[in-house]
């Protein structure tokens, strides 16, 4: 989490929360200066699960001041990007593994003044995103295979973060590195040392008895306490 990165490095994912607790969780996040909520959007085709659509972005923006980071695990990002932008999403990421024109879909996002991101599955070579580093605001490196929350962190993700960070530094781009899946206080120090800027956290936050305490525990870890 770099010093010149003024936003809160924790991006809570609401995929694993019980929807009846959502208002209370979001209120806790707001009280702890969380800036972004991560929406795990699943279409039942790109991944074998279905989650929620643009209405989730619209609903959160109508009640809270959060920015929305929409992670599109969908086969047709070109169709969904405009809908999530219309629903208020501020950052939109889509998978490099989709079969549409990557640069075209990036400009669908940046053309509307929003921040584009590219997502890589754990088995997609990091080099595959290098040609796009100058066109995007962030790279999301999945540390689990996409489709559901609560999975085990893939340790090789640490090396992938370091490899990508080295290329970003060599190119002198401002591209941020976001990591998503199985993140908890035990793997945060390694992710931070490897160069991760932003952490998507779901289950570890929702499984805890006290979300506020867990948020503080995470922040202490990030700040090296
Ligand atoms: C997988 C999802 C999850 C979720 C967070 O498709 O993208 O990675 O955001 O996962 P947990 O619950 O492991 O923090
Ligand atoms: Zn996600």
Image (cartoon, grey):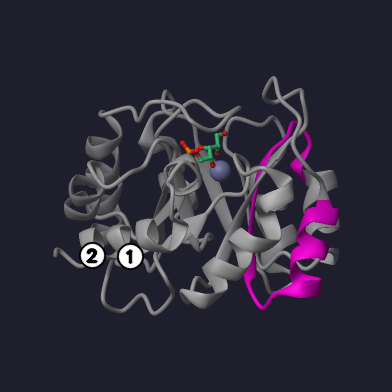
Position of residue 82 measured from the top left corner of the image (x, y, whole percent): 83, 57
User: For the point 30% across and 46% down, which residue is it?
Assistant: 164
Q: Are marks 1 and 2 in contact (CB under 8 Å)?
A: yes
Q: Residue at x 73, y 69 (%)?
A: 111
Image side of residue 129 versus residue 94, left or right: left
Q: Quadrant of residue 112?
A: bottom right
Q: Where does label 2 land, which residue? A: 220
Query: Which residue ends up furthest to the top in the rendered image?
Result: 48
Q: Look at the picture and state if 90 lies above or below 94.
A: below
Q: Quadrant of residue 144?
A: top left
SS state under label 1 = helix
Q: Place residue 44 in its image quadrant.
A: top right
The residue identified by callout 1 is 216
The part of the chain drawn in magenta is 54-77
Q: Which quarter is ligand 2 in?
A: top right
Q: Residue at x 79, y 57 (%)?
A: 84
* Rendered-image quadrant of the C terminus: bottom left
Identified at 49% across, 58% down, the residue is: 11
Give how far across and how far down residue 25 sits, in percent.
59, 59
As drawn, the label of residue 176 is: none
73 versus 78 height, above or below: above
In the rendered structure, the answer to whether residue 153 lies left or right of residue 117 reads left
In this orientation, does residue 171 appear?
Answer: no
Residue 40 appears left or right of 224: right
Instruction: Please say whether residue 98 is one of the residues in the magenta stretch.
Output: no
Q: Is ligand 1 less than 8 Å from the beta carbon at label 2?
A: no
Q: Nearer the viewer, residue 99 or 144?
A: 144
Q: Position of residue 66 (x, y in %)?
A: 63, 72
Q: Quadrant of the N terminus?
A: bottom left
């Amino acid at each position: 989490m770099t010093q010149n990165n003024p936003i809160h490095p924790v991006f809570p994912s609401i995929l694993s929360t019980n929807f009846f607790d959502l208002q209370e969780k979001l209120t806790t996040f707001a009280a702890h200066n969380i800036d972004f909520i991560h929406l795990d959007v699943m279409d039942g085709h790109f991944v074998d699960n279905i989650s929620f659509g643009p209405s989730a972005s619209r609903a959160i923006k109508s009640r809270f001041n959060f920015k929305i980071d929409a992670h599109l695990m969908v086969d047709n990002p070109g169709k969904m990007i405009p809908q999530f932008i219309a629903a208020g999403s501020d950052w939109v990421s889509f998978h490099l593994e989709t079969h549409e024109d990557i640069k075209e879909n990036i400009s669908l996002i940046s053309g509307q003044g929003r921040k584009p991101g590219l997502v890589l599955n754990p088995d997609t070579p990091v080099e595959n995103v290098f040609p796009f580093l100058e066109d995007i605001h962030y790279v999301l490196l999945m540390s689990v295979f996409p489709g559901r929350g609560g999975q085990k962190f893939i340790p090789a993700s640490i090396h992938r973060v370091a490899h990508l960070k080295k290329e970003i530094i060599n190119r002198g781009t401002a591209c941020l590195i976001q990591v998503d899946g199985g993140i908890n206080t035990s793997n945060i120090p390694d992710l931070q040392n490897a160069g991760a800027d932003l952490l998507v956290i779901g289950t570890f936050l929702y499984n805890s008895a006290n979300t506020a305490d867990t948020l503080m525990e995470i922040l202490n870890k990030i700040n090296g306490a």
